[in-house]
Image (cartoon, coloured by chain):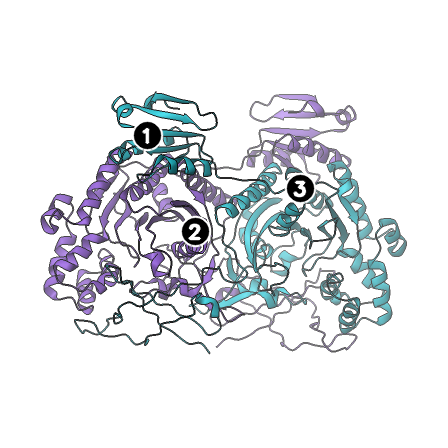
Chain colours: A purple, B cyan
Amino acid sequence: MRAIQIVTTRLSSCLRPIRFELVSSSSSPRLFSNSRRLICTAAATKSNGGRSGSIVAPLVENEEVQKIDVNPPKGTRDFAPEDMRLRNWLFNHFKEVSRLFGYEEVDYPVLETEALFIRKAGEEIRDQLYCFEDRGKRRVALRPELTPSLARLVIQKGKSVSLPLKWFAIGQCWRYERMTRGRRREHYQWNMDIIGVPHVTAEAELISAIVSFFKRIGITASDVGFKVSSRKVLQELLRKYGVPENLFGRVCIIIDKIEKIPIDEIKKELGSTGISEDAIEQLLQVLSVKSLDDLEDVLGGAGEAIADLKQLFSLAEKFGYSEWIQFDASVVRGLAYYTGIVFEGFDRKGNLRAICGGGRYDRLLPTYGGDDIPACGFGFGDAVIVELLKEKNLLPELGQEVENIVCALEKDLQGAAATVATALRSKGQTVDLVLESKPLKWVFKRAARINARRLILVGKTEWEDGSVSVKVLSSGEQFQVKLNDLE
Amino acid sequence: MRAIQIVTTRLSSCLRPIRFELVSSSSSPRLFSNSRRLICTAAATKSNGGRSGSIVAPLVENEEVQKIDVNPPKGTRDFAPEDMRLRNWLFNHFKEVSRLFGYEEVDYPVLETEALFIRKAGEEIRDQLYCFEDRGKRRVALRPELTPSLARLVIQKGKSVSLPLKWFAIGQCWRYERMTRGRRREHYQWNMDIIGVPHVTAEAELISAIVSFFKRIGITASDVGFKVSSRKVLQELLRKYGVPENLFGRVCIIIDKIEKIPIDEIKKELGSTGISEDAIEQLLQVLSVKSLDDLEDVLGGAGEAIADLKQLFSLAEKFGYSEWIQFDASVVRGLAYYTGIVFEGFDRKGNLRAICGGGRYDRLLPTYGGDDIPACGFGFGDAVIVELLKEKNLLPELGQEVENIVCALEKDLQGAAATVATALRSKGQTVDLVLESKPLKWVFKRAARINARRLILVGKTEWEDGSVSVKVLSSGEQFQVKLNDLE
């Protein structure tokens, strides 16, 4: 049950009373940070003219204004300037790596048709969708990931694009999760995807891109590694133990939780799919295998799983990131659609959740009704990496950087200061123009805060001569210069 | 009424049947582009083991896969690579201008508390909100504009930030509008805002920033102009005609529609607020005034409206954009919260909707319960400007740009090609690595499509010597070079 409350505000000092209505619900108690509430009737009152249709509420003198909840909705973030600088720093590295690898940037609507995300494989996504019915009665959802949209766009483009496609995207994704350990309900995700290459060279290049990114931001192979396996391992195991193939997706999702929930719970869930207890024991044993040789002993050398993985490790050497990767049969990743190589980046100290993850999803396009085109890709969130950088003391110091601060020494000269600012900006110089009359002490303080390199003062005598005073703030050096000569 | 339909798909050629469930609603008929639908029962069926909890649907051989709707939800856009290049080009100009003016970038959640946007002033926003209740029973909405979030963040920051703040943002905004004349339901909006400056110097600088932007992308003062007025004009008029001040916001919203709906409709709406017919006639007459001198005749010279506007026109001269702006009493802008100077950019041919708009909103922060801090800003959408650029033939030609395409001449050398690609990328060169064995003809075609500058071929003989073949594609020049010497 929600209560609709109309709060009519009036500032006693306000020449033009502005009415503002807040609709609150009993379940969002944080809406008002002030506990005192003023509740008026919701009925519209006729105003002076008395005609129908008036929506003017009666004026009440000296009402107190209710402060809104100043926090963003639970699980979401504001990006104040200092946060935005870090986000831009991170995203620019994502973009620069993608550019070096020749990938093209794409994006999709943050709001997609709900059906695009609904899969039946025990994935958590379904229960975590931010979904609703729009005013046109369409079921829509805030995207929980980018890959289904990519598949949709690739199918839409059809024959008009030449394969392979190498695309990247940085997009906000939403999941309504329980808020634990600093988990948020939205995050940005960097994706790189290759559409149209069936060979492991594709996965090898994707991992190479992530390694390049780590290196750029100061993360080394002793900080981070990649666990690599193939869904084909599990598939061949299931076949070996006589487990029906249609259980594949469901089993993958359960196994992905191995390090997150107790092993008895895993066994129970696997049992509930109909796999025999015997098969479960053998399965779990094989999943603990950490070397390709041991795996070969179990599976035999003939299967695709072993061949793919061997090729990947060979390519890793050629790409130059052997020390970053290791085989780990337990890696299956939590999405239903992977079909081949899967990998995830992890911190070697074991403090954090997976940093990134990806793999081959050759069946996703046909599942959506598209052509049978092989594909692989990865997702890399903006949350865990920042935790890691913090832990390693690798977060960059990013201050505001403005080259000039321009200030008129008298009120009459504010127009002149505007002329100076325009001249500098047209030469590509960044300028913070002081828009009010302020004491010099204030100006110097602001200059320091924005890391200004120079203070340009516009004074009466100099300006009559077409000149300004320039103070280089690092050295204290000061000189006069004609505006035209100011570079 | 919605119907839940479970569609179980199986590719006959698929080794691992992947089940996919699409939830469709009767009101979104476009969900399937294929008219044939396969509908199974929604009940979960027990699988082999027969234990409860199984969610495996029965397998049906040779089912046909339904192609999903490949379009983004109505009113939204995908950004394929060519669209994304244009978006990045536009956004980079937004960012570069903001940087030259010394503004800091910020962002807010695209999903905000609904209450933040609900105002009672006859604005369309309320009826156009994409709003819903989340799983935690909170009323939330996709933001229709950025300014309320800015106000929220400024209040949150409180005394921890030094005024004035100069912030900019580029964010996606959502309005559920009727889809007419190519209008979409989402657009990106560039905002620049100044918090803490009560003087017209602030508005003057904002317009200067937009003018700088126009100049950068090739738009001139003969293409575009700014209509400028002040809400104080209307306020003084209402006072003059004895109209109660509490009608201010409502009257502004009605008057903003003057060029959008018939004048009789305007009169009717104004009448419904209680203003006398006589006052309406006089009001409409004054709103057609196009010169400050004429306005001064009506209002007298003593008011703030005339003083502010005169100062703005004087500053426009100093900033160097006099030819871009003109007084127009009919401009009031459609948002309830403006209080002083208002302006909008328009195309002089009159073909397009307003290109951008903004003004002073000194009362917004106190309305939300914050301190009484003056503020002004503008919003600049990404839609109309692109239409204008198209019309003026000013859209840039933006192709993909990759410096190198690297290709192994034999399958065995794909690892070597990976080594070459890694070496080039570590030197800051962009590389498209050919990930499969392809004929040279195919490689040349791809090189042309991505505008590659050089083709690097990795052949057996050269590679044994640690060398590769380089072909400069513009000149046809070809040479061999040691990998270490390749720059």
Q: Considering only vertical position in the picture, is A51 above or below A202?
A: below
Please, which chain is the residue tagged with disc 2 on? A
x and y, in percent, of residue B71 in the image: 48, 60
3 or 1: tag closer to the N-terminus: 3
Q: Is residue A255 above or below residue A6?
A: above
Q: Nearer the viewer, residue B473 or B144?
A: B473
Kind of residue indicated by mark 2: Lys
Specify few, some or many for label 2: CA neighbours under 10 Å numbering under 14, 14-19, or 20 or more. Answer: few
Is residue A130 something that shows in the picture? Answer: yes
In this view of the protein, can residue B105 be seen by the observer? no
Q: Chain of mark 3?
A: B
**Which mark is on residue B420?**
1
Q: Which mark is residue B214?
A: 3
* Drawn side of residue A195 relative to residue B381, left or right: left
Mark closer to the observer (2, 1) = 2
Circle 3 — which element? Answer: helix
Residue A408: % across, % down: 71, 33
Which residue is disc 2 drawn over?
A: A159
The front one of A227 and B483 is B483
At 49% across and 42% down in the image, what residue appears?
A85
- Residue in the picture at 72% in, 50% down: B346
